[in-house]
Every structure is written in structure tokens, then in C-alpha cells.
């Protein structure tokens, strides 16, 4: 029985009544804005094709771009996907967490979820509200990032309300997302390949598997793997012009000077070592003064949104060092710039 004297739950902690109401919406085929540790998701009952169709419609997302199925634990994951030895090891090491595994699907998964592929994407989000919601709904939840297709992913409940407020029956507010970039999408077999770099670094995956882990689009760009067409079909999140602000965005390396035109917006990594270009300048966001890639990832999308809201003629974004989370951050920046 609910204790009327109990204080309201701290942000991010499940309020049982709110979670139960959201779960009821999901079971009735409606959509719910769901916080995760990466970005907010637009959740629907993954086993209900009409609800899944509503997700595609609300996002304006093409039906050839398959969705990630969110589950509460590995046991539930194996009700929608067939695990392999690699998958079992990765699930044990990284779930709950920002790693999505691409595995053979089971028959219960609607075609719409996988865009007709014979594989399904599955992950266990590391957020108390998401886990409580999945458990209360009693079904796996298909949830793409809760943004309009091709736009910047949401990292707060307010971002979800702005872009998709009319499409959802409820939004659970779990506060700002801890990681800030989406999950890493990994095809496990026959060899492990990252289809989308994200919150779980290739270094960590390789350390658990004790084998090299390839990066699909880099390999394809280098021409060393005939993956470009296949990868584009399998993970359209790899397509250029994703995560795009409205203003045109151009990349610069740390060594290039900042623009002199004060109207241009600047997205800096550390903000140091950039000369007089940034000092005292308006329209500037610094992602991490100490050069911490995790901090930079957490704030990346919100900073891009703030700069975009100024309606600058252009945004200049500084790329970050490539290793570790730099791979995911630079990937998002390149796509925001419309580069592959
Ligand atoms: O962090 C995340 O992953 C967030 C939160 C909400 O969990 N979700 C997310 O979903 O980013 P979405 O729909 O924006 O991106 C899913 C990515 C897409 O690039 C899609 O192409 C890929 O996963 N994907 C889904 N199913 C796939 C499959 N069967 N094979 C290959 N790629 C797949
Ligand atoms: Mg997305």
C-alpha cells in the first residue's frame, strides 16, 4: 500500500504510480517517453505491431530503419533474440548498459521492429526508471531515440516534449541522461563489428572478447571491407546527415583557428589551446574544460541544441581525440556535419 507520508521520489527514481500509469499506456498500445542512461527513448510495446507503427509515424522515421528492443535483463533478451557465445559474454559484462547486440531474432518479434531483417537489436538500459517501466509493462519495449528522424537526440524530458510531446501519452522524467550519446550497436557474429559507435567503447568490448572489434563505417570508408551498402541497410543510423542541427555545421580540428565572425556559433572541446579565438566570445559552448571525454559526451547534444537555438549562420564544431568515447563523439559530429 502506498504510504502517503513518504517523500516524493528523488529525480530518476521510480514513482510507482507514475510508472504503473505509463506501463498501462504501453499495454494499451500508446507511446511513452522513457529516460535511459544514453538518450531518451520513444517507447512502445515491441510485440504490438500497431504500437510500433505509431513510433515510426511519430518520428517520421523510414520503415527500413529497425528499432532497438529494450528488455529488463538478459533472460528477457533471449525471449526475443537467440544468444551466441559472444553475446552471452558481452551481456554478462555490459548489461545493464549502453551496448546493443544484433542477434538472430525469434518469431515473436514483429517484422516492423526489425524492418524485415532476420536479426533484432536488443539491450538492457542502465536506468532505474527504464527498468521499472519495462518490468511494469511486462513486455519488451521498442524504443528509438525520442527525436524527429535525423534530428538531435534528446537528453532531457524537455527535449522529448519539444519534438514529440503530442505523440506520447506520458513522459517519465529521469533527469538529464548520464552518458549522453546512444548505445554502441554491435553485430556479434560471425565477427564482432561495431555498426554504430556509442557509450560502450570498442576498447572495452575487445577487452572482454579478447579479440579485435571492427568499426563498420571506418572499414567501409577504407575500402577494406565490402560493408558500405550492407551496413547502410543494416544500420541506417550510419547514414550521413543524422543528429543534424538546423544550422549548417562544419568541423574543425583542435589546431585550426576559430572563426572571427562573432555571429558564428562555436562548439569547443576543452576551450583551451585555441588562442584568442574563443576568449570572451558569445555563442560558444565548451564540452569539457578538463578534456574529459565522458563529460563531453554527456553534454554534447544539449550543447548542440543550445547553439542551434541561437539560429547562427553556421556552427563550427571542434573534433575530439579519437580513442575511447571520442569515436562516438566524433561520429555524431561528423553526421551532424552531413559527412559519412
Ligand atoms: O542508446 C540508444 O541506443 C537509444 C536509447 C533510447 O536506447 N536508442 C537508439 O535507437 O538510439 P535508434 O532507433 O535511434 O537507433 C537504433 C540503431 C539504428 O542505427 C538502427 O539502424 C540500428 O540500431 N539497428 C536496429 N536494429 C538493427 C538490426 N537488426 N541490425 C542492424 N542494426 C540495427
Ligand atoms: Mg536515433
Image (cartoon, helix red, strand yellow):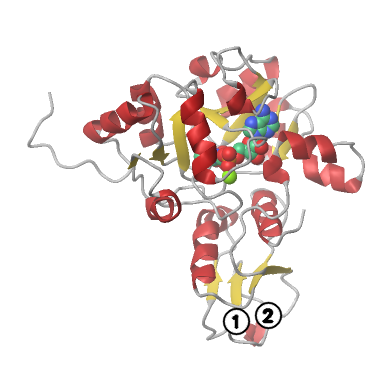
How many badges with numbers are in the image?
2
Give the answer, above or below, for where 270 lies relative to 186. below
Where's residue 35, x and y in %?
41, 42
Does residue 182 appear in the picture of this structure?
no
Left or right, residue 15 beside residue 257: left
Query: SS for tag 2?
Result: loop
Vertical arrangement, residue 291 with respect to residue 129, above or below: below
* Residue to which mark 1 is pinned: 278
Q: Residues within 10 Å of mark 1 (few under 14, many from 20)?
A: many
The residue wearing badge 2 is: 258
* 191, 102: nearer the viewer: 102
Q: Residues within 10 Å of mark 2 (few under 14, many from 20)?
A: many
Quadrant assignment for ligand 2 = top right
Quarter of the image for the N terminus: give it. Answer: top left
Taking the view exactly as shown, the residue that stands out farthest to the left is 5
Of labels 1 and 2, earlier in sequence is: 2
Give me the residue at 70% from left, 24% from top.
117
Image marks 1 and 2: residues in contact by CB distance under 8 Å: yes
- Can residue 100 be seen here? The reply is yes
Judge left or right: residue 299 versus residue 194.
left
Amino acid at each position: 500500500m502506498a504510504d502517503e507520508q513518504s517523500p516524493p521520489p528523488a529525480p530518476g527514481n521510480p514513482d510507482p504510480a507514475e510508472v504503473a500509469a505509463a506501463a498501462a499506456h504501453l499495454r494499451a498500445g500508446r507511446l511513452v517517453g522513457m529516460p535511459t542512461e544514453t538518450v531518451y527513448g520513444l517507447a512502445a510495446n515491441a510485440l504490438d505491431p500497431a504500437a510500433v507503427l505509431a513510433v515510426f509515424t511519430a518520428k517520421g522515421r523510414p520503415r527500413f530503419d529497425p528499432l532497438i528492443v529494450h528488455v529488463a535483463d538478459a533472460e528477457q533478451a533471449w525471449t526475443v533474440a537467440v544468444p551466441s557465445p559472444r553475446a552471452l559474454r558481452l551481456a554478462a559484462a555490459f548489461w545493464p548498459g549502453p551496448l546493443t547486440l544484433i542477434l538472430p531474432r525469434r518469431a515473436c518479434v514483429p517484422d516492423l521492429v526489425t524492418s524485415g531483417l532476420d536479426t533484432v537489436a536488443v539491450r538492457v538500459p542502465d536506468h532505474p526508471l527504464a527498468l521499472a517501466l519495462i518490468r511494469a509493462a511486462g513486455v519488451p519495449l521498442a524504443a528509438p531515440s525520442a527525436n524527429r528522424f535525423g534530428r538531435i537526440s534528446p537528453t532531457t524530458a524537455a527535449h522529448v516534449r519539444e519534438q514529440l510531446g503530442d505523440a506520447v501519452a506520458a513522459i517519465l522524467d529521469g533527469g538529464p541522461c548520464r552518458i549522453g550519446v546512444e548505445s554502441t550497436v554491435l553485430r556479434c557474429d560471425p565477427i564482432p563489428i561495431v555498426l554504430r559507435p556509442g557509450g560502450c567503447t570498442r576498447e572495452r568490448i575487445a577487452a572482454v572478447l579478447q579479440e579485435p572489434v571492427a568499426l563498420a563505417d571506418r572499414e567501409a570508408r577504407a575500402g577494406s571491407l565490402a560493408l558500405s551498402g550492407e551496413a547502410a541497410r543494416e544500420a541506417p543510423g550510419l547514414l550521413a546527415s543524422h543528429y543534424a542541427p538546423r544550422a549548417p555545421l562544419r568541423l574543425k580540428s583542435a589546431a585550426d583557428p576559430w572563426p572571427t565572425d562573432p555571429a558564428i556559433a562555436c562548439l569547443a572541446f576543452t576551450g583551451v589551446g585555441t588562442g584568442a579565438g574563443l576568449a570572451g566570445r558569445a555563442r560558444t559552448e565548451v564540452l569539457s574544460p578538463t578534456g574529459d571525454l565522458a563529460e563531453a559526451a554527456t553534454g554534447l547534444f544539449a550543447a548542440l541544441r543550445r547553439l542551434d537555438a541561437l539560429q547562427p549562420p553556421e556552427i563550427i564544431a571542434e573534433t575530439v581525440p579519437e580513442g575511447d568515447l571520442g569515436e562516438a563523439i566524433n561520429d555524431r559530429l561528423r553526421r551532424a556535419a552531413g559527412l559519412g
